[in-house]
Amino acid sequence: DTIVGTIIVVSATRANTDAFDIFQPNLGYLNPFKWQMMIDYSVDYWRKYPSKYQAKGTVDLQLIPSKSLYQLYHLTQNKIPAFAFLQFANLTGNKKLIKKAQKFKKFYVDRLEMSNHVFTAILMKEINYKSEKLEALRHEIPIEDWNQFPALEVKSIDLKNYFRTFSYGVKNFLLKEEASFPSPLLEDADFITNSITLRTTPSHSTSQGPTTFYHTQNLSQDI
């Protein structure tokens, strides 16, 4: 909504000029927040309102600030179990078990490594686009027109509730599940924790499953 609103307002104010201006509707610049906040309040929603597609066990997310520590976790928690499972399945010759082991490796090793590679650029380096021009736009159009685009009032967005409401939208509109709208935020240690690990226990496993880890340099880094 912020981006669309910016496009509409900029188009209206620059339509009859030859100026070439770049406008950055950067939420993180106008209303700073940290990766930690996003993780805490997103995970909080899924803990309180789990999906029917969710694997058995708890769902958490952990961002590890040390690359070497991340690689160690990934090796011990994901790669070794996956390759051991596949090796065992091949030794048994059971086609059904082999297929399951291959799927296990594909998800917990191949896809995980691919996703980490994709997100490394934004997790490891803080990119902050300044948005003074967006703020200045409010003085170029009548206030009644500006008020038609509430998403441009980025500084007033309650980001804690935003992340929880975003999770509600994912569950309701993407997963097509009956979803509970997030209750008012509770600044309670039972709901908001500093232990953030995306951990899923596969339904075919009776023990605690592998952990999905994302590597980031600084948990307090601005998004």
Image (cartoon, rainbow, N blue to C red):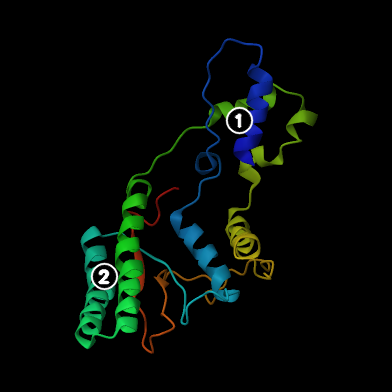
Q: Is residue 111 left or right of residue 7?
A: left
Mark 1 neighbour density, 10 Å: few (under 14) some (14–19) many (20 or more): some
Q: Residue at x 69, y 22 (%)?
A: 12
Residue 36: x and y, percent? 45, 59
The tag on residue 19 is none
> Dot 2 lies on which element?
helix
Q: Nearer the viewer, mark 2 or mark 1?
A: 2
The residue beneath circle 2 is 73
The residue beneath circle 1 is 135
Where is the N terminus found, in terms of image quarters?
top right
Identify residue type, mark 1: Glu
Mark sitting earlier along the chain (2/1): 2
Tell me the quarter of the picture where residue 7 sits.
top right
Residue 203: x and y, percent? 44, 83
**Observer-nearest residue: 8 or 157?**
8
Tell me the quarter of the picture where residue 46 sits.
bottom right
> Does residue 80 appear anywhere in the picture?
yes
Identify residue type, mark 2: Tyr
Q: Is residue 204 left or right of residue 15?
A: left
Q: CA distance from mark 2 to mark 1?
A: 43 Å
